[in-house]
Image (spheres, rainbow, N blue to C red):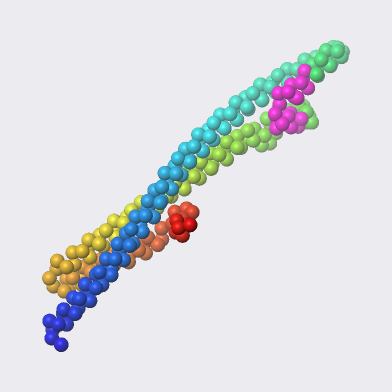
Amino acid sequence: MSENQETKKKEERLELWIAIFLGITALLTAWATWIGSLHGGNQATNYAKSNNLSAEGNSMYNEAAQNYMQDMLLWNQIMEYEFDYQLAMDRGDDNEAKLIEDKIQILKDDNCTEEFREAVDWSYKQDGLPSPFTKEGYTDSYYTAALEKLDEAQAVLEEGQNDNRNGDRYGLVTVIFSLVLFLLGIVGIFKKLPNRVLVFGISVVFLIGATIFMCTIPMPTGFSFFGYFS
């Protein structure tokens, strides 16, 4: 076999490999673009959800603060009646004491929430009638639901940030795949076979590296390929 024929066969094999890798790279580019767009969609959804949860959590926090202030005012009123009750008892005015006691009971029954009533009952069982707000963990309980909602909003925000980060990584992968397509596309302009092989080899290295990097990037949350066909 002549040297020209051998070179021609090598060129034909190289062209075949170029065509194969062009197809593979095109498919991988399409895949990376699609998955990157899914990450972008999840990012937008999570950011919007986080904003809504934050707004709801802040509203709950403000409501909790108002309830806390109202209960403090209610407790101060109960304490005023308790002071008047003790004065009436000291004077021996049982009728006045009974009237004030009834007022205290009405305040408890008609104005106290179940949680605050439990805290008030706890106070009455303690020596010196301490404030119910000194009960361990009670003051924090006003804000528990709001803080849980805000924590949920933060978690969703962080998930959206991860989607943003992963979407950017898929964008980088797409850029590298585009570079591979460019290198494979210009192989033919080189006249000498060694130069073609060199450019082809560089493109394969980039392709393999980008593919490995892509495999390390998490898929979008809840992603199911076959779910799109169901």
Please name the residue shown 17% across and 74% down the image: 194
Q: In terms of depth relative to the viewer, which is nearer, 179 or 87?
A: 179
Prevailing SS of the magenta stretch: helix
Magenta residues span 103-122
Q: Is residue 160 magenta?
A: no
- Residue 135 appears in which quarter of the rendering? top right
Q: Position of residue 224 (x, y in %)?
A: 47, 57
Judge from the rendering whether residue 89 lies leftward or rightward of residue 81; answer left or right.
right
Residue at the bottom extreme? 1
Please name the residue shown 70% across and 29% down the image: 113
Please name the residue shown 12% across and 70% down the image: 191
Q: Position of residue 72 (x, y in %)?
A: 66, 24
Answer above or below: position of 25 versus 14. above
Answer above or below: position of 208 versus 132. below
Work out whether residue 164 can be spotted. Answer: no
- Residue 201 appears in which quarter of the rendering? bottom left
Judge from the rendering whether residue 163 lies leftward or rightward of residue 194; answer left or right.
right
Work out whether residue 129 can be spotted. Answer: yes
- Residue 68 appears in which quarter of the rendering? top right
Q: In terms of depth relative to the viewer, which is nearer, 134 or 100?
A: 100
Judge from the rendering whether residue 228 lies leftward or rightward of residue 129; answer left or right.
left
Answer above or below: position of 142 versus 12. above
Answer above or below: position of 209 versus 36. below
Q: In terms of depth relative to the viewer, which is nearer, 63 or 89?
A: 63
Please name the residue shown 41% across and 47% down the image: 41
